[in-house]
Amino acid sequence: MSRRFRLCVLALGLLAFAALFTAACAELPPFGGDRHPYGDRAVHAALLRHTANTVSAVNFDQRALDTLGEESILFASVLGTVVLLRQTSDEHRTVPKPSPVPDRTRRYGLLALPVTLLIGLYVVAHGQLSPGGGFQGGVVVATAVHLLYIAVDYRALERVRPLGPYEIADAAGEAAYVLTGAGGLLAGAAYLANVLPYGTFNTLSSGGTVPLLNAAVGVEVAAAVVVLLARFLGQALEIEGDEDRGEGKG
Amino acid sequence: MSVLPYLVAGWIFLVGVYGMATSRDLVHAVGCLSVTQSSTYVLLLAVGYRKGGSAPVFSDIEPGSRPVVDPVVQALALTDVVVGATVTALLLALVVQIAKRHGTTDPDALSELKG
């Protein structure tokens, strides 16, 4: 298929989409309108279950099964990346040489590391109260660990990041979510039902199973990002093709 | 223009698809896929917006004291951001392996089969 022909087919598809989408937009409720039946009901249900952050209530209570699916996609794609970025038989590992880091970068990195870590844990722990939760906080925690790589060097990062425990933590986070859901069955309710006491509104222990599921997701996301970045850093810094194969030849 | 935000979402989608279809580098194609994906966030958040609405978080506002935007679409967008990032990582890992095995990341040069 020539490039020109392909562009024509593409233009046809894009124009058809643009026409249909514009027609559909004209029928949508106007932007900023007052009618949000699902939103109103979700807010009502969240407040009944003493969860101040309604977004977390939707994710980890009302649509908890859907989040299990999303989390499994995350788990599966991390697994796929780990499998794809293995060291193959025609590659070997080298030890990356340490390189000097400017003093300012070092100071900033070492200062920012504990603060970032704390913020990440705060965001995970307060997911049921204020904006945040396991997904966002997990990424912040994983970022904190990698400040070591920027501020010191790769070997320092490897020392605080033994990959085995993080891979186990990733699986444990996923398992904790599934098992918390099974707790609902044991209590005689549906799978992933919010069976714990709802607690006092706007306190850390409010929301029933929401903080637990939040923590499980936080552990999984943090471990997943660490494992992902470790694999990419390994490819960039450690794994090299053997001499006879050479760069770029199959 | 009460439909402008929806049209912006559609425009981002079109730009992303155009970039993917005409891409000459797989890394660029993965980037375009992320752009296409982000059009759904814009559409979702536009659908959920309410004029004068505040964030649907009641840790510092009294429930019922003021209108809040739709939390359902925000929850949809938020899970997808993180999941989308890891799927992007998976695709980039595939690109790394393709670059190693075939020595190129130009999709047009990758037509032949290789064992």
Image: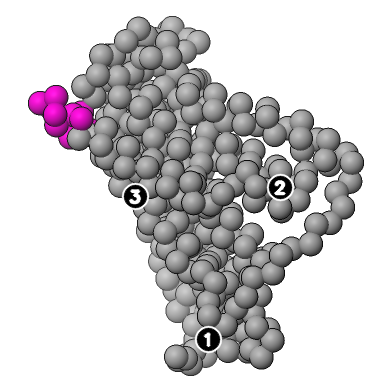
Q: Nearer the viewer, mark 2 or mark 1?
A: 2
Q: Is residue A60 left or right of residue A234?
A: left
* Part of the protein shown in magenta: A183-193
How far apart are the alpha carbons under marks 2 and 3? 31 Å
At label 3, counting other C-alpha atoms closer than 10 Å, the crowd grade (few under 14, some 14-19, many 20 or more) is some
Residue A210 appears in the picture as rendered: yes
State which mark lies toward you, 3 or 1: 3
Residue A121 to residue A148: above or below: above
Picture quadrant where residue B98 is located: bottom right
Q: Amino acid at mark 1?
A: Leu
| Among numbered discs 2 and 3, the one appearing first in the sequence | 3
Q: Residue at x 45, y 56 (%)?
A: A78
Front residue (pair B99, A82): A82
Residue B112 in magenta stretch: no
Residue under label 2: A156
User: Would you call the spot at circle 1 few (<14 residues within 10 Å), some (14-19), or many (20 or more)?
Assistant: few
Residue mark closest to the camera, 2 vs 3 = 2
Left or right: A192 with respect to A78? left
Element on which disc 3 rests:
helix
- The quarter of the image holding the C terminus of chain B is bottom left
Residue at image position (24%, 19%) is A196
Real-space Cα separation, disc 3 to disc 1, in angstroms: 31 Å
The image shows residue A195 at horizontal and vertical percentages of 21, 22
Q: Which residue is mark 1?
A: B110
